[in-house]
Image: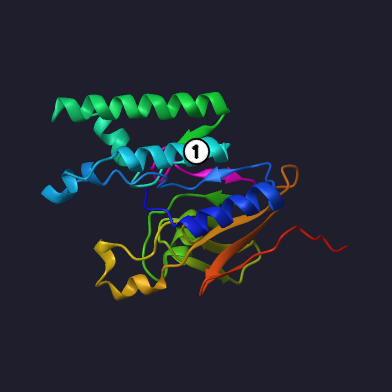
Amino acid sequence: DMQDRDATRTFFKFAEDHWKPHVRIIGGDLFDFLCIRNGASPEEQADSVTADYQAGMEFLRRFKPHFYLRGNHCERLWEWASRTQGNAMVIDYCMMGVREIEKDLRAMGCSMLPYDKRAGVLRLGALHVVHGFRSGLTAAKMTCMDYGAPTLMGHIHAVDRWSAPGLDRRAGWASGALCQLDMPYNARQANSLRHSNGFAYGAYNDKTGKFWVNLAECIDGEWFLTEKPVILK
């Protein structure tokens, strides 16, 4: 429910009317689940999850992803659902949410990966896709170095690119985000000025493993992206 409405509209218009991807990936943090985060304040614990959950499910059912990588915010629901101690009503509610999400994903034929540094890695040929386990200015670089392969991530709410010389391709990308950039929690965090709306798209050859990543970004209210792929021979 914290999505940026203009960014979401642009994303769906591009995906549905122009790019029409054969492989669709949700890179994580489809939901926030603020009220059940570890260390939630009394005010955060009182935050209703209904609008957040409904907005996330609406996005999920419209996009119909082939892969859903849970993010650190999504993971809150699964962590609570697996608890054996704590508030039983919260645990039961989270279990219901997990069952509904997983039922919808099965109906779509979508594979879900947990928020995990090993099990949460999607491999598309030479490209590794993760939600992200690094933050800060070097997140794209460090994520690429962690996995020793070209890596696409989300997590940091910023559009970023990094590359290094090498016989084998070494590059990292961060996709930006579709959420609102200014929220109460980051009102006094100057580093959040780096945040920007964006999303990743590209091409992938499932026979050779070769791929191409491009990043759509909104700059001062104007979107920059390619409407269709052009291959020059």
Where residue 136 sits in the image (x, y, percent)? Answer: 36, 68
- Quarter of image, res 23: top right
| Residue name at image x 44 percent, y 36 percent | 57
What's under tag 1, amino acid-wise? Answer: Leu
Q: Is residue 125 above or below residue 140?
A: above
Where residue 211 sits in the image (x, y, percent)? Answer: 68, 54
Q: Is residue 61 above or below residue 40?
A: above
Q: Is residue 120 inside the magenta stretch?
A: yes
Where residue 174 sits in the image (x, y, percent)? Answer: 50, 61
Q: Which residue is mark 1?
A: 60
Where residue 44 sits in the image (x, y, percent)? Answer: 18, 49
Write down the region rendered in magenta: 114-126
Q: Is residue 41 among what the camera can see?
A: no
150 or 70, which is in the foreground?
70
Q: Is residue 138 inside the magenta stretch?
A: no
112 or 92, which is in the foreground?
92
Q: Is residue 191 among what the camera can see?
A: yes
Bin the neighbour count of mark 1 within 10 Å (Cα to Cα): few under 14, some 14-19, many 20 and up.
some
38 or 197, which is in the foreground?
197
- Quarter of image, res 228: bottom right
218 vs 187, left or right, is right
| Residue name at image x 30 percent, y 62 percent | 183
Locate the C terminus and report the quarter of the image it occupies.
bottom right
Q: How is the image coloured?
A: rainbow
